[in-house]
Amino acid sequence: MNKARSIRSRKNAKEAPAFSVCPAGRRYPLPTDRDYAREFERLKRIADAERRKGREIVVVMGLGFVGAVMAGVIADSADPKTGKPGKFVIGMQRPSTRSFWKIGYLNQGIPPVEAEDPEVAPLIRRCVRRKKTLMATYTYDALALADAVVVDVQCDYNKETLGDCRQGSADIAALEDSLRIIGDRIRPDCLVLIETTVPPGTTEYVAYPIVKKAFEERGIDREPLLAHSFERVMPGREYVCSIRDFWRVCSGLNDEARRRVVKFLSEVLNVAQYPLTVLDRPIESETCKIVENSYRAALLAFLNEWSLFAERNGVDLIKVINAIKVRPTHSNMIFPGPGIGGYCLPKDGGLGVWSYQTLMGFDDDIFKITPMAIDINDTRALHAAELVRDALRNMGRIVAASRIAVLGVSYREDVGDTRYSGSEILVRKLTEMGADVIVHDPYVKHWWEMEKQDTYPAPGHSRARFFRNQERLRDLVVHKDLARALRGANAVVFAVRHQAYRELDPDEIVHMAGKPAAVVDCFGILDDSAIRRYFELGCEVKGLGRGHVKRIKDEVRGPQPKADATRREGRNR
């Protein structure tokens, strides 16, 4: 145990800077070999004191988007009869230069993740400072103190080709490493709850063999208590509620693990209003998450072809969808915009396809719709770039000589999450075509996919590799001043349905731009009166799924002469 820790520490010292820098610029010194022993002794004293209070020790591995708030939710839970906390939570984060600062943040009562939910900051502050039921550490030895371990280690799906998810694979190396460490350190009766979204079969085919082997090497003759329960976390103003006050599915590898995970989740989540669904095997729980997100992704991809149909045949797909949604059975139909984002929908189906052939060992090809949906959603923003090109052409300009303002870079309206954002592909394609791209978003402070594209999400895995001419995007600034972002713009792209953009007046846009511009609506933001006004102001308008725009243009300016229309037919499609 100590030898492995020392090797990691020496490796950090040799290969990386001695500091981890937080988003605000503060430098946090990385721990040295001597720090580990002192830290573990401190943790043991704290854990002993908490146990004397009747509290269970819970270690949450990974203080990222899910783990940080899950740790807070567990630490904030209390016995409904006494009102006293029943859990003491230790958040565990690997001491890397990239993320060690999260430990310092959390120990000060500061959330290590950005969130629009006003409940996040008070939750973390309350648990750390007032209730004193939450802390963070960097040493894996904390696992030896745990009654339960919640695993929130990232499991990604690496795509090698844009638009072909089959040319990719699940990246479970970090999860496997974490499981080995868990097996080496936990007590035999410790519950291990895998909360990460994983390929179906991971708990049984990957986690169990790793932990079981570690137990055997330690002389432990009992079955590991492995369980799985995926989260349904949503960014935005109900971030905490989507973890604490929402339905959960869970399962255990054996009867004892199933009993323990039901008990644990019932003590920390609002199961009175949102009852647990308990499945027989972890593979069922894991499959549940993948099918749930693949279903949503497939519906969005399905609307892509009808969006193209609408554009080419004078149909406004937004009106069509709204007419359909009157029917209760179809009320959740959503227009896909310039692609779908977030951490789950763009990749989760790929985990299922990979698992079937890799973990299960099947060599046939049963998956058709799931990978196709991912490919369609991944590349939809390329068509948005084509609309920008065509709108500029209609004004006598080309992309390579234009200043283009993209409004909205997050993946979802009224949140600041940029993971797998459709705007990223749009900006990268326009940049590849030579445009001077300016971006604005009221919620996003840093667009890490651009700023850190050499190393984020991992070295060699940025989507920059699918395009040329991407180097300057490292310096891309997300503007907060809309007037400054629009000044001199030849084209304005509404890429996200932020409330702030839905309220904009066409006259304001043209005034801020200083001239008529090509306006492209990627998300059904503009109603007919706004489209009409843009044409009256001398602008050109295009929109995903907005085939009726040409009809409004003809009403404002009159139909084009037949000869002129024939000449332009090919380029205006």
Image: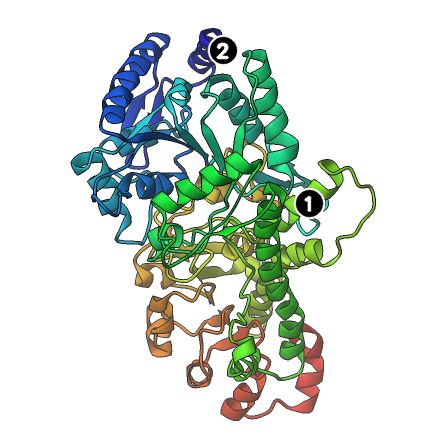
Residue 384 versus residue 417 in the image, above or below:
below
> Which quarter of the image is occupied by the C terminus?
bottom right
Circle nearer the viewer, 2 or 1? 2
Q: Earlier in the sequence, mark 2 or mark 1?
A: 2
Nearest the camera: 252 or 174? 252
Label 1: how many Cα within 10 Å (few below 14, some 14–19, many 20+): some
The numbered mark at residue 294 is none
The colour mode here is rainbow
The amino acid type found where label 1 is placed reads: Thr
Q: In screen coordinates, is 228 left or right of 43? A: right
Q: What is the residue that sits farthest to the right in this orientation?
A: 364
Residue 49, position in %: x, y?
A: 23, 22
Residue under label 2 = 4
Residue 170, position in %: x, y?
A: 64, 38
Residue 18, position in %: x, y?
A: 36, 17
Q: Residue at x 31, y 41 (%)?
A: 72
Any part of residue 443 in sight: yes
Residue 374 versus residue 351 in the image, above or below:
below
Q: What is the residue that sits farthest to the left in this orientation?
A: 130
Toward which corner of the image does residue 220 lie, by quadrant?
top right
For mark 1, give the secondary structure. Answer: loop
Label 2: how many Cα within 10 Å (few below 14, some 14–19, many 20+): few
Residue under label 1 = 161
The amino acid type found where label 2 is placed reads: Ala
Q: In screen coordinates, is 518 left or right of 349? A: left
Q: Residue at x 34, y 16 (%)?
A: 31
Q: In screen coordinates, is 553 left or right of 2? A: right
Query: How many badges with numbers are in the image?
Result: 2
Toward which corner of the image does residue 385 lie, by quadrant?
bottom right
